[in-house]
Image (spheres, rainbow, N blue to C red):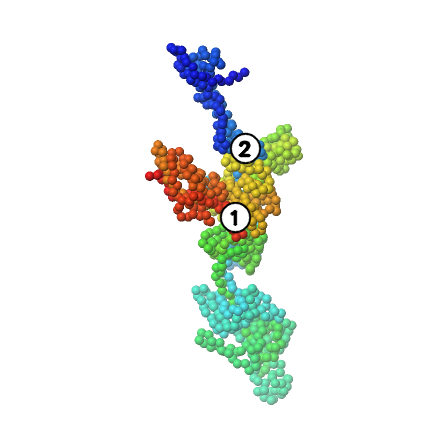
Amino acid sequence: MTLPVPTIKPHALPAGSESCGCCAGVEAETPQGISNRYGLSAIAYRVGDYAQFRDSLHAALSSAAFAPLGKLQSRADDDFTIGLIDAFACAADVLTFYQERIANESYLRTALERVSLQEMGRLIGYRLRPGVAAETWLAFTLETPPAPPPKLSPEPGSFVTGVPAQVSIEIGTKVQSVPGPDEKPQTFETVERLDAARPAWNAIRPWLAETRRPDKGDTVMYLAGQRNNLKPGDALLIVGDAFNPGTNDSNCDFRFIDSVELQSDFDRTKITWQAGLSGVTAAQNSKVYALRKRAAPFGHNAPMWKSMSTDFRNNYPSGSDAPEWPDYTISPMGSAQGGGFIDLDTVYSEVRAGGYVVLSMAARGSIQVIIKAFGKSDVILDLGPHLDVYQIADAEETSRAEFALAGKVTRLQLRGSHYDRYQDQVRRITAFVQSEQLALAPYAVDDAATGSSIPAAVSADGLIAGRRLIVRGNRVSDGKAVVVQANLVSAQAVDAGRCMLQIDPPLAGSLERGSVVVHGNVVPASHGETVTQILGSGDAAQPFQQFELKQVPLTYRAAANESGAASELTLRVGEIAWHERATLFGTVATDRVFALDIDEQGRNLVKFGDGVSGARLPSGLNNIRATYRKGIGVAGNVRAETLGQLLSRPLCLKGVSNPFAAEGGNDPEPADAARRSMPLGARTLGRVVSVLDYEDFARAFTGIAKAQAQVLQLPRGKTIAITIAGPLGAPVNSTSPVWTNLLAALKAGGDPHVAVVLLPYRPGTFRIGLKVKRDPDFDAKAVLTAVEAALRAHFAFDARELGQPVQQSDVIAAAQSVPGVVAVDLVQLYGGTAPFAQTIPSRQVRLLASRMHVDQGVAKPSELLTLNPAPFDLLEEMA
């Protein structure tokens, strides 16, 4: 039977007593009452401490309830009884200390140990978030095959370089960061296979110059170089790609040069003509030819038939009554299928098959026109009503003796139409021959790259839809360098070495053309390094076998599930893969599954079933093999352009870079975050129905620190808008895997027909200035330092909520709570961002943070106000 400890009343001692008198007025002080108000970060749960237990035991020595103890009169510390009391008081003090700690570890708000939170979470099916690995995009550079020697012109495929034109980049290609001061190198691995990587796609650039094709209405043209040997009056032929003599002979233009200007600064020649072009357009791949020679048909200079003597005409085979020479045609060969022949008046060795001929027939009685250029005059014949373009099918040198003339001629077989109109017009025809193609001068192109189309100086061959690209360049508006990731929609060929890349999403702004670089050998990668471990041997006689993963920390990647993370662990028993489950509960004896667990020592354990909840492991020697990755957390959030060391070097891989900073890396869930997230999971149970469910689900998602949901009326209808922020205020944007996976998880856990939009939060800051009156017993510098620290902690990201205003009273109360502060004079409180910005130093009653709203049909996120990290405007003692 346990007797209660009585209350010892004060009593008088006999005069002359040898007692020390220490018992006079002593009462029992234990057990102490336990009472805690709501909201404490730690609770009191001790029924007494060492002094209280000792005093209560001392009081019991004089209690009438324990009369036999009354004989123990000594209270000296070296007395055996007092020593025993001291020992019991010490033991009770230790026991109640740990009892209080156990009590604190039993409540969500007061628990300090991670294992306590872990065990409490298990009661409601919640697993502490393991953290996730950072992810980024890698742009690989391949070796460029060497060009053949200048004097060697090998057949295609016969010049062996040893460098393949295309390689594959496998999953698990390792890359390491170059650490900065006080940093450690971090290993990343590719998480997807790139089937086709080519050197030409290392860094694709736009073409900065292009040839402007002749267009309708043009009267000017620029030719490459200054040695084109052109002068005013020379004939010019412009032929479109659709031109076909005899079937489509309107797709061309013929002009005489009006002026020639040599432009040495640009190494080009400017030529002009009078009438604008009408037969060709810029959309056609037109070619420009100079017709170097003017010729006439054989016999054009024959004496007039009527001027010949009567005897000559009578003896001529065809008689003398004809008005013109008998058989007076441009060629005795006559017409042919699709054209005809013409004999030129002399030998033109430069005229060859494949070239062009323009036949012009002057009108009867035509006059000559004069073209003036450079102050000189050139006389040419009026072209008259007929002008036709022919292509030379064949050219040969032959002899003719006819029309009282004899000599060598050039016989041309022409391909084209309207030949008959020229056949007997020997004296009226002018033939423009010896066509020589002229190269058009390239124009400098400085059009900005904008929207979804990017010009690329590379062949479209092999660039298929879905390819990942990284586009970088300087913004036109402010010159700032930007980097964006996009997917290739299509590559539309412009010509053999150029194409237009259609990307999605489009560029948000215009980029300076000369600064644009498109990386085409792009692969996603995540933080972590692959390791292989033989876990041990299976034993079918043992239920719930478990093995430890020796390499830590286990890598988790962002995933579209309730927790937002999935482990990078592949486990095989023999050659058969087993699959991970969150828990073995609910599995059956035939399920080849395992569960991951973390024990109180922080070890990663792989647990198997017992033949009822999950299959037992089959017996075997070292038949349990795990392949997993190690590496996780914020250490993987490396800066851009730091992943440059190739640890894996496949054939022809030359270099690598990360144009983007790695992002999304989060450490395992800290205690404060677990306290917030644990009830949220219990409220949603993996399903989202109400607006609050959407907010709770997002807030409990790995990689999300703050979330706020609200229904907004957008043009497409009512939409659930969720403003999100990452840990420590890190932005979460649409390119982040956390964003993508959260959106997918919300769709999977809720109604897929409900419109949901995610918004990255809007960070805002405010500034303060204050004077402090301190207690004279406290050091001035220490008090001011403590005030600043208290205010920064009170208005830090973790302590604030989205859309929460800042009140004067908040600032004063936070400063006033610092020990040694007697009074606070708040002098300045201003800041924030539009539309509530107060940028002029002043003392506002409160600063409002913008909440989610619709502006011109666009959803705008909530703002989170934090104290500006710059020094306070004022922090000093009151005078």
Q: Label 2's element?
A: helix
Q: Is residue 562 visible?
A: yes
Quarter of the figure with residue 23? top left
How many numbered callouts? 2
Q: Which mark is residue 118?
A: 2
The residue that disc 1 covers is 853
Nearer-the-camera pick, 300 or 28? 28
- Identify the residue shown where x is 38% and y is 34%: 820
Q: Are marks 1 and 2 in contact (CB under 8 Å)?
A: no
Image spot of residue 239 (x, y percent) = 56, 68
| Relative to 141, residue 124 above or below | above
Is residue 264 toward the left or the right of residue 733 in the image?
Answer: left
Image spot of residue 335 (x, y percent) = 63, 75
Nearer-the-camera pick, 477 or 774? 774
Q: Is residue 559 visible?
A: no
Give the spatial CA distance, label 1 vs label 2. 38 Å
Image spot of residue 145 (x, y percent) = 52, 53
Task: Say what amino acid the circle numbered 2 marks.
Answer: Gln
